[in-house]
Amino acid sequence: MASQTTAAPWNDPGAKPLIRFEGVSKRFGDFVAVDQVDLAIHKGEFFSLLGASGCGKTTLLRMLAGFETPTEGRIFIDGVDMSAVPPYERPVNMMFQSYALFPHMTVEANIAFGLKQDRLPQPVITDRTKAVLDLVQMGKFATRKPHQLSGGQRQRVALARALAKEPKVLLLDEPLGALDKKLREATQLELVNIQDRVGVTFVMVTHDQEEAMTMSSRIGVMNSGRIAQVGTPVDIYEYPESRFVADFIGAANMFEASVRQSGTDQVVVNCPELAHDLIIAHNDMLPEGTPVTVMVRPEKVAISRDKPAEGLNWAQGVVADIAYLGDVSIFHVRLESGHRIEALQTNLRHTDERKLTWEDPVYLSWHPANALVLTK
């Protein structure tokens, strides 16, 4: 996750956000791309807008950049209403997935181009170009042209060009989408480290959950033009506020249930798919009979041939499928009701022998604190 050297400003009610969306909507004819978004992003954040294709995340980014005009609502950057500010006068710069480098120019000339357009003095252009090239470790490639660079190197040049203009906000639209998996993973960490050093606020659009979780200080999960939840990667993964977020971020086992009994620190629910009650740690009182969804992550589910100890939630079934991924194995267990539960087991030792295999009868168990009750 992105490093944060200062206290989280989003937890301070008195902190003034750098970027603020107020009731922002965008319609294209009858289609509502963005629907009444309220959002605050603070200085120095690495903030990601995460969602599936068509959820409105790129439209929201383009409105921030000034490439689209909100149908309703206002956008503020550093307290200034951007409604009448054209894109080229906004304190933002945008880095595209295609990188959009000039093929006939050297790396150095690509970076200096925007500074020359701003009519900065030549000594300033020279110093700033060298500084950002050193920052992205591309100084020795200054005289090369884009076709002489790898995808990762072109990505660094595009980043250097964007940072050279010293924007208050850097917008990144799927910036690593053109890279292969290994290079993308390495570049994620590099990008986070660079952002941490320069202190510029980054706002990134991505559909890649792992990318958002790795790089972000906070994530805004979008669904059908709305913000479904905003939080740190830990908040989003461990404490999703809705079934949509729980299902969208990572793998999740879910059970339909109804509240049987609710206390101050736990709730007992009836779960027909398991044919018995579940106990879940929960702080809110819920009326008896309230329909809920119980969520538990696969890595929090233990799998064994032995019946679990008292006090744990459990289920019984047979191993229907096994996915061996090297470092972990994922067991798909079929219950008598037909419902399937995933359990993730870390492979800690070298072995050719499987302790559990297909069609083995097994018990699954999890601690009440490792499940979550979702009411929406």
Image: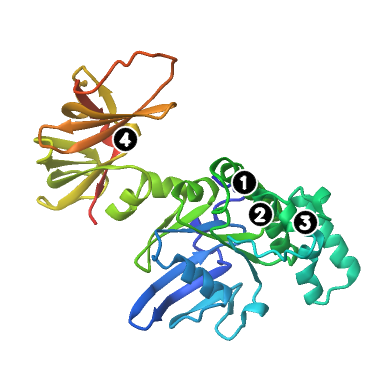
Residue 373: x percent and y percent?
24, 46
Q: Residue at x 52, y 76 (%)?
A: 75
Task: Compute the Cα span from label 4 to label 2.
Answer: 35 Å
Q: Secondary structure beneath disc 2?
A: helix
Across and down, in percent, residue 34 comes to 40, 73
Type of residue at label 2? Gln
Q: Secondary structure at mark 3?
A: helix
Residue at disc 4, secondary structure: helix
Residue at numbered disc 4: 298
**Relative side of 105 to 197, left or right:** right
The CA distance from mark 4 to mark 1 is: 28 Å
Residue at numbered disc 2: 155
Select label 2 or label 3 by which is in front.
2
Of pointers 4 and 2, the one earlier in the residue sequence? 2
- Disc 3 vs disc 1: Cβ atoms closer than 8 Å? no
Side (left or right) of 151 relative to 268? right
Mark 4 or mark 3: whose residue is earlier in sequence:
3
CB atoms of marks 2 and 1 within 8 Å: yes
Instruction: Check disc 1 and report its element: helix, strand or loop.
Output: helix
Say what amino acid the circle numbered 1 marks: Thr
Q: CA distance from mark 4 to mark 3?
A: 43 Å
Name the residue at 70% across, 50% down: 153
Q: Given this view, does label 2 or label 1 mark the residue nearer the observer?
A: 2
Quadrant for the N terminus, please: top right
Q: Is residue 268 above or below residue 349?
A: below
Q: Which residue has dot 3 on it?
A: 132
Figure quadrant of the C terminus: bottom left
Mark 2 is surrounded, within 10 Å at the Cα level, by few (under 14), some (14 to 19) or many (20 or more) other residues, namely many
